[in-house]
Image (spheres, rainbow, N blue to C red):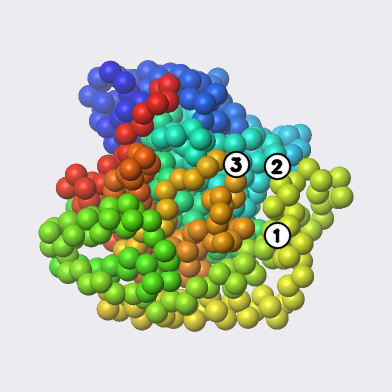
């Protein structure tokens, strides 16, 4: 049996029944990770010794019938922006030193440790997670499992590739403008950006309240299980939300009957969407109607907030690198250096003007969700493009925000948003559909996504052409 093909829910059921063990699952996941690394470059480092030690401890707990928590023995990967005790967190940067004791876990990592998860390794990220593709001066280019000439997306590209290829069913990602949803869509998996504060962050992101942490998984049920664990408060994050009133896993099964769904294929004609992407999303929206949702094609009252987003994003990058020496700056990604220069030019009034745009956008989306439970859009207007570039060849915009118009607005508003794999284009590259709900309705996003998986509409895109 290929345990690398199983979801976390399926692994846990197998452990309970004694059909296989956490040691077997971890060994297979590590072997898969080693085999895919030369082709896809999903990992900064594997933590094999620690992983096998934790798997043996988990196996003994399961033998006694005393699992430590909800994810005991499940292999997990961690984007290399999260602290993982005992291992360096370099954040994709040659300007960060490996020296140090590395004694802390990030909040989400700490919760996973408490629940017995097995850490396979740290996954790749662009430098400080600054862009929507995954390449960096530190670790090179992360490639798409479906076509190694294409990007895996970013900034959680290593996590998306690892999950897609079976190197652990669960991964922790971050999303400041689409960084969970972009690579999840490009790699054909499920990715959820929860409501801001649902998953605590420490250290705080330089990009402030744009940055969310969340699950990257094979399906919505695994994401709900993971969110139930990592969505607990942590005293180190003063903006963390209180515990969710209900289990996300228990809320999965309510279906979509009677939900009011707004379908916006192009944000009112503002976005040019590739025909294959538009067709896959439209077919899936029709299935939502078949499942009992009330679907209306309509658009939210949004004008493109990209300039406000740039003000906040570039300012955060400038602040992050403010104290870097000239030598350290020379080690940085040239594109990151460029936006830091731009960010340093913004005044406090510029920043507050961007906050005003953000506040008004949040007001408009709040009113929109008084009428509609869910907004559905394409996750991205295109499928994965060539690896090693920030934007597709011939694109009108140099920056990654030029091709992600469906994702970053909902970081400004802090709403929960997920991407669900809903098919492929003519080249076999995955297409993602985005589900957006009002703030604090993560349960609704997961519930609708789960209904699509249960109906066979959504599924992890099969990977071919990669040694797995």
Which quadrant is the C terminus positioned in? Answer: top left
| Residue at numbered disc 3 | 388
The secondary element bearing badge 3 is classed as loop
- Give above or below for 416 relative to 224: below
Q: Which is more toward the observer, 387 or 231?
A: 387
Which of pointers 1 and 3 lies earlier in the amino acid sequence?
1
Is residue 34 or residue 79 the one in the foreground?
34
How far is disc 2 from disc 3 in space, using C-alphas?
16 Å
Residue 93 marker:
2
Residue positioned 45% across, 45% down in the render: 384
Q: Is residue 292 above or below residue 364?
A: above
CB atoms of marks 1 and 3 within 8 Å: no
Q: Which residue is mark 1?
A: 339
Given residues 166 and 150, the one toward you in this image is: 150
Q: Residue 268 in the image: x percent, y percent?
A: 37, 74
Q: CA distance from mark 2 to mark 1?
A: 16 Å
- Dot 2 or dot 1: first in sequence order is 2
In this rendering, the label closer to the viewer, 2 or 1: 1
């Amino acid at each position: 049996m290929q345990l690398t093909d199983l979801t976390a829910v399926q692994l846990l059921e197998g452990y309970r029944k004694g059909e296989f063990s956490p040691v077997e699952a971890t060994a297979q996941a590590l072997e898969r990770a080693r085999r895919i690394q030369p082709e896809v470059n999903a990992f900064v480092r594997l933590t094999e010794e620690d992983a096998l030690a934790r798997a043996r401890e988990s196996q003994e707990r399961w033998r006694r019938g005393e699992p430590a928590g909800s994810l005991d023995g499940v292999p997990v990967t961690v984007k290399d922006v999260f602290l993982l005790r005992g291992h360096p967190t370099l954040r994709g940067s040659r300007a960060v030193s490996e020296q140090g004791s590395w004694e802390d876990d990030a909040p989400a990592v700490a919760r996973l440790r408490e629940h017995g998860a097995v850490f396979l390794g740290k996954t790749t990220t662009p430098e400080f997670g600054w862009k929507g593709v995954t390449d960096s001066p530190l670790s090179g280019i992360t490639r798409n499992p479906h076509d190694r000439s294409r990007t895996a997306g970013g900034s959680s590209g290593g996590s998306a590739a690892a999950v897609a290829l079976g190197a652990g069913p669960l991964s922790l990602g971050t999303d400041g403008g689409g960084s969970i949803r972009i690579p999840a869509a490009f790699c054909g998996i499920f990715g959820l950006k929860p409501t801001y504060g649902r998953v605590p962050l420490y250290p705080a992101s330089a990009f402030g309240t744009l940055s969310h942490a969340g699950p990257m998984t094979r399906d919505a049920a695994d994401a709900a299980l993971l969110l139930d664990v990592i969505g607990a408060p942590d005293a180190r994050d003063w903006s963390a939300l209180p515990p969710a009133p209900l289990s996300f896993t228990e809320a999965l099964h309510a279906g979509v009957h009677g939900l009011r769904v707004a379908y916006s294929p192009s944000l009112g004609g503002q976005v040019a969407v590739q025909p294959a992407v538009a067709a896959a999303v439209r077919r899936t929206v029709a299935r939502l109607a078949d499942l009992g949702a009330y679907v209306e094609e309509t658009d939210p009252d949004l004008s493109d907030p990209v300039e406000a987003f740039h003000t906040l994003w570039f300012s955060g990058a400038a602040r992050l690198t403010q104290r870097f020496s000239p030598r350290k700056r020379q080690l940085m990604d040239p594109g990151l250096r460029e936006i830091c220069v731009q960010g340093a030019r913004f005044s406090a009034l510029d920043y507050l003007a961007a906050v005003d745009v953000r506040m008004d956008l949040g007001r408009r989306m709040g009113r929109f969700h008084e009428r509609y439970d869910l907004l559905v859009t394409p996750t991205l207007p295109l499928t994965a493009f060539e690896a090693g570039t920030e934007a597709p060849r011939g694109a009108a915009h140099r920056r990654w925000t030029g091709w992600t118009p469906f994702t970053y607005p909902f970081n400004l508003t802090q709403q929960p948003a997920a991407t669900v794999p809903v098919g492929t284009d003519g080249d076999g590259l995955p297409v993602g559909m985005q589900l957006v709900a009002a703030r604090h309705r993560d349960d609704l996003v997961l519930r609708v996504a789960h209904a699509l998986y249960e109906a066979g509409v959504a599924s992890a895109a099969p990977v071919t052409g990669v040694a797995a």
